[in-house]
Image: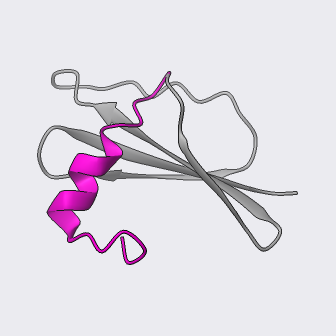
Amino acid sequence: MTQRDLVLEEYHIFLKEFPLGGTPLCWKEGKGVWKIVFVPLQGAQTCIPWGGTGSWAVSGNNEDGFILTLWKEQ
């Protein structure tokens, strides 16, 4: 957010450009690789398929979906 000079609402819009199944937002930092994807809300229950390795976190955007953050040490 800081590097792109975005407020939270703008950041959420930006992340929608990286949907699950598409190309994730990726970067390397230290020994880690980070990936972020947007998962749209799919009704009362949304299944987020995850078969990879590493750590992950899911957070809602309080509007229409979820932000899936994945990280792994190399």
Q: Vertically, is 22 above or below 15?
A: above
Q: Vertically, is 17 above or below 26?
A: above
Q: Vertically, is 45 above or below 6?
A: above
From the viewer's perspective, tell me whether residue 39 is left or right of residue 69: left
Residue segment shown in magenta: 1-21
From the viewer's perspective, tell me whether residue 57 is left or right of residue 53: left
Percent across and percent down for residue 11 are 27, 59
Q: Main secondary structure of the magenta part?
A: loop
Percent across and percent down for residue 36 are 50, 48
From the viewer's perspective, tell me whether residue 32 is left or right of residue 19: right
**Outermost residue toward the front?**
4
- Which residue is pictured at 25% across the width and 25% down the height? 45
Percent across and percent down for residue 74 are 88, 57
Q: Vertically, is 18 above or below 29?
A: above
Query: Disc count in the image?
Result: 0
From the viewer's perspective, tell me whether residue 66 is left or right of residue 57: left
Percent across and percent down for residue 42 are 22, 21
Q: Quadrant of residue 17?
A: top left
- Which residue is pictured at 43% across the width and 74% down the height? 3
- Depth check: give the residue in front, 46 or 30: 30
- Depth check: give the residue in front, 69 or 27: 27
Q: Is residue 49 magenta?
A: no
Q: Quadrant of the N terminus?
A: bottom left
- Which residue is pictured at 15% across the width and 38% down the height? 64
**Outermost residue toward the right?**
74
